[in-house]
Image (cartoon, helix red, strand yellow):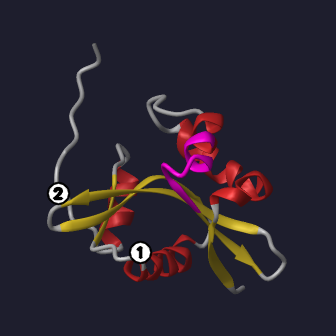
Amino acid sequence: MKMTTYLVPTHHIQQFWHLAAPHLQKAIDKGHGEFNIDQLKLVVAQGQQQLLIGLDEDQNCLAAVTVKWVMYPNDRVAYVTYSGGTQLKEFFNQFLSWIKNNGGTSVQCSTRYKSLIRLFERLNFKSKYTLMELKL
């Protein structure tokens, strides 16, 4: 099955969000409450993050990812805030091409699940930092 990855322009979020939301909701459910699905939709619609979806030939959404760009003096980092779906390896390869084509120098993400750490390591990710937090 062939998948094509598309960037959803902010002015089309309303038409495509329902396709991505089930995949993103699963990722949100595994988080620590930073976002709910409606809040994520709002920041994407406002252009603070971008939505990419992977569609098959029948326009079924197989994967979705939200990304925010982080600018450092020496890097343009695509930080994955939420992702989910099926056929993630094919989607991920197209996603990496999109990052490179948009001036990205690296991609980063966070997880607390060892199974996802192993998956990311198979995709050549390296551990850079361990994120620690103290809730006040």
Q: Which residue is mark 2?
A: 128
Question: Which of the marked residues, 2 or 1, is nearer the chain's N terminus?
Answer: 1
**Residue 84 in picture, x, y percent from top left:** 57, 57
Q: In terms of image quadrants, where is residue 127?
A: bottom left
| Badge nearest the viewer, 2 or 1 | 1
- Whether residue 5 appears in magenta in the rendering, the answer is no
Counting from the top left corner in percent of width and height, residue 27 is at 54, 46
Measuring 36% from the left and 47% from the top, which residue is drawn there? 111
Q: Examine the rendered structure and indicate whether residue 120 appears above or below residue 112.
A: below
Residue sitting farthest toward the right: 58
Label number found at residue 18: none
Q: Secondary structure at mark 2?
A: loop
- Say which element carries label 1: helix
Residue 46 included in the magenta stretch of the image: yes
User: Residue 62: horizontal and vertical position, in percent?
Assistant: 68, 67
Give the label on residue 99, or none.
Answer: 1
Quarter occupied by the N terminus: bottom right
The amino acid type found where label 1 is placed reads Ile
**Count of residue discs:** 2
* In-image side of 89 versus 127 (left or right): right
Q: Is residue 133 left or right of residue 57?
A: left
CA neighbours of label 1 inside 10 A, class few (<14), some (14 to 19), many (20+): some
